[in-house]
Image: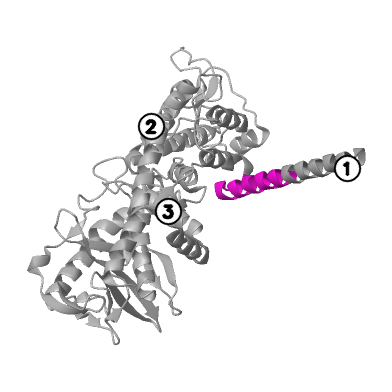
Amino acid sequence: MQKDVNFLGGQRFDKEANKIYKVPVDKLPKRDFLNTSTNQVEEYVDFESEEFKKVLIDFINHHKEKQVPRLEELKRYYMADNNIKYRADKSPNRADNRIASDYAAFIVEFKQGVLLGNPVIYNGNEAIIKRTEEFSNKNNEDYHNQLMALDDFIYGRAYELVTRNEEGVEIVTKFDVTETFIIYDTSNARNSLCGVRCYPIEFNNVITTVVEIYANDGFLYVFETESADLENLELKDGYPEEQFFNAVQINEWINNEDRLGDFEKVLDKIDAYDLSQSEMANFQQDSSEALLVIKGNPDTFKKADGTLDKEGVDYAQKSRMLILGDKKQNGDGTQGAESDAKYLIKEYDVQGIEAYNDRTVADILQFSKLVDFTDENMGGNQSGVGFRFKGWNSDNDRKNKERMITKALMRRLRLLTYSWSIKDNLESDNHENLYDLVNDIVIKFTPNVPQSDKEVMEVIKGMDGLVSDQTIYEMAERLTGVSAEEESKRVDGELKDRLSESFEFEKKVEVEEVEEDVQEV
């Protein structure tokens, strides 16, 4: 990281730091492939051609030069390594504290915890849900989603690879955003043409640059070069390699349509807060090291010959005591000022600085779409409508994030189901039916927010008789910890037991009545 960043001045990132890479497919060379599932010859881009390699190299260089610097700076802020650390040095004789706040991590981790603190739930076709749960258990999907959301909220984008391992089991893994990007076509649908991952490998003091292309033709292309010059890229032996997926395997999560991070718009506010806190610390330090002004007798600490009495200075410092002489008697009969000594310090507007800091923090929370936790009325008694209104902006942001993540999860499911369909040897017509079932999957998010159990119970009571029992069970799940499906089974079991007990009781009564009749006879 270079010193002397452009601190609170000018444009922070390159204008193309968030550019989406697109290419007109009709202008790229093509090659024919036989689709083994349909036995049809299909036309795809020739990813081994020199024309495509040139486009690829241009995008890789652009990504490194224009986009990676932004991603690295956002990561620094998440790690509380803010630009205040790199502003121009002050005079060596002045305090130069550089205090970085951790608001970037607070914003990201708060939103991550609220949105995905509870695992997402899939509802739909039982066969697909069963396989999805198996995939989730094998890949620790809940934790993986947390990692993806973290990147998504920091950088505005995140990348994962859906593939098979050596045993043929579907797995998902997160890719580094500084090494990964997607190339799309220029159609209105913005279909992904391929996913690119470019990274270095160092071995025996030799750095090899590796470029992986996960193409929409279902193959993986791996190029290598043992120099930094990408012009020397060569296809690695054994590639292209079939991947058993019918689409680009790199799945992109986006935070919003502009692919902005959650704290990106308040970076200047964070810098302003860091500067205020740092200058406050500088003031305190400079005050303790302030200049001592002695007025009225300039001969203090002077010897008869006019030189400085260093022993007198040392004594005053050690004893914490200063003895001033009388007024200076001038030769013309006039006198100097009254003897006095004081430190030369600036006036400090405590209330003004505190008000400025409070306003800055409130702006950071508001503009990053968080509830203002500094509001003194947050913990007070207020109507439910008033409290919800305070969190309205945050709730809208959460719902938008749910939509964006749902889009990414559904694409992941489509990739997985295609791989599963190949294993099951499904015909092409059945692929379409399978996609219809996938599209009917509903993904449910449960916000991880504090809530009064008593209020939830009151709501459940009020809903009784108005909604189905299944809905009641789902609402009660957050209180009991028992899934709606399990609760339904328990209730059905208890009902059967009661009916059985009731039947046995009635049967017993009938037998006793018959025995009494027999005795009377």
Residue under numbered circle 2: 393
For discs 3 and 2, the disc positioned in front in the rendered view: 3
Of the residues under marks 2 and 1, which one precedes in the sequence?
2
Residue furthest to the left in view is: 27
Of the residues under marks 3 and 1, which one precedes in the sequence?
3
Question: 222 or 9, which is in the foreground?
Answer: 222
Q: Position of residue 171 (x, y in %)?
A: 43, 69
For the residue marked with disc 2, what is the amino acid? Asn
Please tell me which residue is depicted at 30% across the width and 79% down the height of the picture.
Answer: 242
Residue under numbered circle 1: 518
Segment tinted magenta in the rendering = 481-501
Mark 3 surroundings within 10 Å by alpha-carbon count, few (fewer than 14), some (14 through 19), many (20 or more):
some
Q: How many marks?
A: 3
Q: Position of residue 431 (x, y in %)?
A: 30, 66
Circle 1 sits in a helix, a strand or a loop, which is it? helix
Judge from the rendering whether residue 55 lies leftward or rightward of residue 334; answer left or right.
left
Quadrant in which the N terminus appears = bottom left
Residue under numbered circle 3: 124
Question: 262 or 65, which is in the foreground?
Answer: 262
Circle 2 sits in a helix, a strand or a loop, which is it? helix
Observer able to see residue 68: yes
Residue furthest to the top in view is: 333
Q: Position of residue 210 (x, y in %)?
A: 31, 76
**381 relative to 7, above or below:** above
